[in-house]
Amino acid sequence: MFKLRYILTVLAAAALLAGAPALTSAADFKKGLAAAQKNDWKTAFREFRELAKDGHVESQYYLAVIYHRGLGLRQNYTQALRWYTLAAEKGHLKAQNNLGTMYRRGEGMKQNFERAAYWYKRAAAKSTAAKANLADLYRYGLGVEKSNKAAFKLYGEAAAGGEARAFFELGRLYEKGRGANKDLTKALEYYRKAARRNYPRAQFLLGDFYHHGRYFKQDYVQAERWYRFAMERNYVSAFYGMGLLYRDGLGVIKNTVESLRLLGVASKQGHRIAPYEIGQIYEKGLGVKKDSEEALKWYRIAAKRKYKKAEDLVKKLTGKPD
């Protein structure tokens, strides 16, 4: 993740020109990286903060990441914004990209798509991630004039640089016929390319296609395969899909206990439909004893997540909306 050897080589070269302090900075930065790799965020924070105050760009970036993600300390968007900005203004590509994302999401501030576009554009010449993010803005007309063609071009450039998400988004554009002529063969080709690069959303989508026989002949073994890949990346919907396979015994041996476990994992992470399917298992007695009260409990969870089938069942079973 961290291009440590390259960073240290550059810093050591600078030390020859500037004297001992740069070597000290290199050692301190190496210590911060080593601590971060061990999840020792207290030490990493201390080392990066001191170097960041002295204007060390990489340390400013990593310090911003610590604040942004709340690694070992309370999440602080204000401080993340401050340090990302300092590094971004000095040309740090990842800082520019992350800064754009903060503006796009409105993290610690009001959403500002124009500023997001500004920083993505600054990084896009050399960053495939920024290219893909900028493409998103063109695709939906956020902070820039809406243009599927511009989005398609940027996704293509990002994909050429190996950006997995860009392959997936190209697949979506080909599937929908936006920015390019509709072409399901190319769409599936790009979905597979994204999936093979471990992009979990693409892996789940392939599993879902095989599960429900959409675009492919129904193949539950392939569905199970791709769901598992996505589960390894903790993609929530994959737990839901796999839960249904175990419930129905499709491509796997029917196992209600495992089905409930997987659907429970998906529900715990906020999946909208998973609690409804758990309710169905209890209401219909699918491998368990029928339990209308337990079913209603799960239906209510799904209803609160605005799943209409669950809302209707809650109303039917209680005589009133949840």
Image (tube, helix red, strand yellow):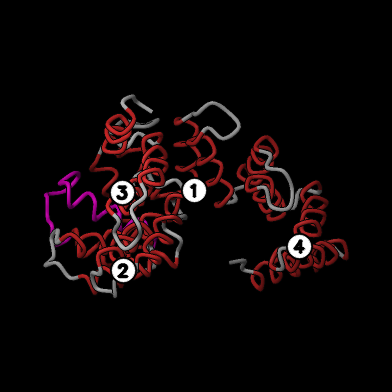
> Circles 2 and 4: CB distance less than 8 Å?
no
Residue shown at 28% from the left, 74% from the top: 252
Q: Secondary structure at mark 1?
A: helix
Type of amino acid under label 4: Asp
For label 3, count other residues whose C-alpha is less than 10 Å away and answer few (under 14), some (14-19) or many (20+).
Answer: some
Q: Residue furthest right?
A: 20
Does residue 78 appear anywhere in the picture? yes
Q: How many marks?
A: 4
Residue 235, how many percent across, how many down? 41, 58
Residue shown at 76% from the left, 62% from the top: 40
Marks 2 and 4, how far apart in space?
A: 35 Å
Type of amino acid under label 1: Ala
For label 4, count other residues whose C-alpha is less than 10 Å away and answer few (under 14), some (14-19) or many (20+).
Answer: some
Viewer-closest of 97 and 287: 287
Q: Nearer the viewer, mark 4 or mark 3?
A: 3
Query: Mark 2 or mark 4, which has the lower sequence index?
Result: 4
Q: Secondary structure at mark 3?
A: helix
Viewer-closest of 100 and 111: 111
Residue shown at 67% from the left, 34% from the top: 78
The residue wearing badge 4 is: 40
> Circles 1 and 3: CB distance less than 8 Å?
no
The residue wearing badge 2 is: 226
Type of amino acid under label 3: Glu
Query: Mark 3 or mark 2, which has the lower sequence index?
Result: 2
Marks 1 and 4, how far apart in space?
A: 30 Å
Query: Mark 1 or mark 4, which has the lower sequence index?
Result: 4
Residue 143, how many percent across, how many down? 40, 30
Type of amino acid under label 2: Trp
Q: Nearer the viewer, mark 1 or mark 3?
A: 3
Residue 83, how many percent across, how many down? 69, 43
Marks 1 and 3, how far apart in space?
A: 53 Å
The residue wearing badge 3 is: 283
